[in-house]
Image (tube, rainbow, N blue to C red):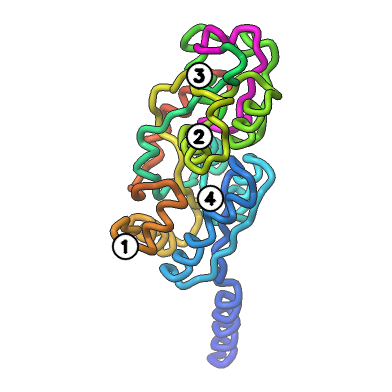
Amino acid sequence: MFKRLMMVLCGVFLCVTAFAQSVLRVSAIPDEAPTELQRKFAPLGKYLEQQIGMKVEFIPVTDYAAVVEGLASNKLDLAWLGGFTFVQARLRTGNAIPIAQRAEDEMFTSKFIASAASGINSLADLKGKNFTFGSVSSTSGHLMPRYFLLQQKIDPEKHFKRVAFSGAHDATALQVESGKVEAGVLNASVWEKLVQEKRVDTSKVKVIWTTPPYFDYNWTVRGNLDPALIKKLTDAFLQLDPKVKPHKDILDLQRAARFIATSPENYKGIEQAARSAGLLR
């Protein structure tokens, strides 16, 4: 009986060992071009591997909903989410945990932009114009801009000639610059990066309005991830030090001064805005 019991216990141990997690599966909402997301994540992925002692694999997705479903189905362990996508993930899973956000995400904004040739100088001038948001599930490219428009008694479907969705912030800027649409909205961080890198011609596109601030992006883990691993990941983000050259390079790519702790309570305002705008039932 003793030998039989030992054989059973050994079998259980081997099974647990065999199925122990050996790869951290990471993704991000596709709010920029896939190549840009990969470029931004590469150094961060290597840093996380060093900090948690585990291989890190970046898994690109085609839309925002895929990230939420990936967390819900345990196919993803860690994801870069917008505020609205986090709310959706939290409601879908019941236990998604935000572990870190950029300091900038406490006071995030969106930029309304217009073609310089369009004669648009204010939100009022958008009446009867073609307008594009980013992705339907984007916090800074759709939800919060829509919410602030509605607060000013501007119903996009009635106020604009046509409402479109570009799918990503950089795509919105390029569509306005090319004249495909007369105006659009994108997150302030991407706009600033496009201007800094001269990827948008500011003689052809101009900012006409900046929204009030709100909470936005964060790094979220699935709620049933090993608590010890969650702590290692949280510590890894919070320990990134802008005074350390390799860390600063990572932070610069993430457009972050530093990462700070966050909590689900920070995103209650996003949930309320989504319900108010009719994007959550």
What's the residue type where badge 2 is placed?
Trp
Depth order, front residue of 92/111:
111
The residue sitting at 68% across, 28% down in the picture is 178
Between the C-alphas of marks 2 and 4, the distance is: 22 Å
* Helix, strand or loop for disc 2: helix
Q: Nearer the viewer, mark 2 or mark 4?
A: 2
User: In terms of sequence position, does the residue under pointer 1 or pointer 4 come before the other?
Assistant: 4
Disc 1 and disc 4 in contact, CB within 8 angstroms: no
Residue 40 drawn at (x, y percent): 52, 54
Query: In the rendered image, which residue does mark 3 sit on?
Result: 147
> Which disc, if any, is residue 79?
4
Between the C-alphas of marks 3 and 1, the distance is: 39 Å
Number of other residues with Cα within 10 Å of mark 2, as a class: few under 14, some 14 to 19, many 20 or more? many
> Which disc, if any, is residue 218?
none
Residue range corresponding to the magenta coloring: 120-140
Number of other residues with Cα within 10 Å of mark 4, as a class: few under 14, some 14 to 19, many 20 or more? many
Depth order, front residue of 126/149:
126
What's the residue type where badge 4 is placed?
Ala
Q: Nearer the viewer, mark 1 or mark 4?
A: 1
> Which disc, if any, is residue 244?
1
User: In terms of sequence position, does the residue under pointer 2 or pointer 4 come before the other?
Assistant: 4
The residue sitting at 54% across, 9% down in the picture is 154
Query: In the rendered image, which residue does mark 2 sit on?
Result: 191
Residue 221 drawn at (x, y percent): 49, 52
How many numbered marks have been drawn onto this rendered protein structure?
4
